Image (tube, rainbow, N blue to C red):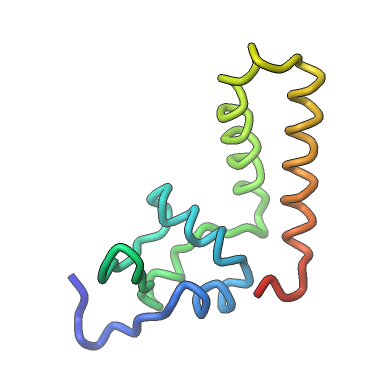
Amino acid sequence: MVQLEDELLTVAEAAKLLKVTRHTLYRWIAEGRLPAVRHSRRVIRLRRKDLDRAPDRRDGTDDADAAQSWAERLAPFMGIMTKEEADIVFGAIMEAREQSKSDPDPF
């Protein structure tokens, strides 16, 4: 339950504070890793106090989790593409992910 004293931030404001993209926050919310307050289907707010518990991208654990997650997501398509094609797609995804981390202003 949201209390009156809770400071609520937009996804863009929270992303700027955490120095991640909005898409990363939406993913964390969808995965249940970051609690959010939904006012409607399109209006999401984040409590400032919940941002302290946000996953830390700097410790490297999120990278390992993401790599495993992508591998699991690609697994159903292994019959459709060869192992080499899957490795190329996976490599491209991880390369794009690394580039997005170094983006100085993702907004």
Outermost residue, bottom direction? 5
Residue 21 spot, x, y in % from top left? 61, 66
Task: Tell whether 79 sits left or right of 3.
Answer: right
Q: Nearer the viewer, residue 13 or 60?
A: 13
56 or 28, which lies in front?
Answer: 28
Q: In this view, does 58 lie above or below 71?
A: below
| Image location of residue 55, percent across then percent down | 52, 57
* Tag count: 0
Image quadrant where residue 82 sits: top right
Nearer to me, 80 or 23 = 80
Q: Residue at x 67, y 59 (%)?
A: 58
- Name the residue nearer the viewer: 22 or 60: 22
The N terminus sits in image quarter: bottom left
Left or right of residue 49: residue 2? left
Quarter assignment of residue 75: top right
Which residue does the image show at 79% across and 22% down from the upper left? 85
Q: Where is residue 35 in the image (x, y as percent from the top left)?
A: 35, 61
Which of the 4 image quadrants contains residue 91? top right
Outermost residue, top direction?
79
For image coordinates 57% across by 35% down, the residue present is 69
Residue shown at 30%/63% (left/top)? 41
Q: Quadrant of the C terminus?
A: bottom right
Relative placement, left or right, of 44 versus 63 is left
Check the image and report above or below for 98 versus 42.
Answer: above
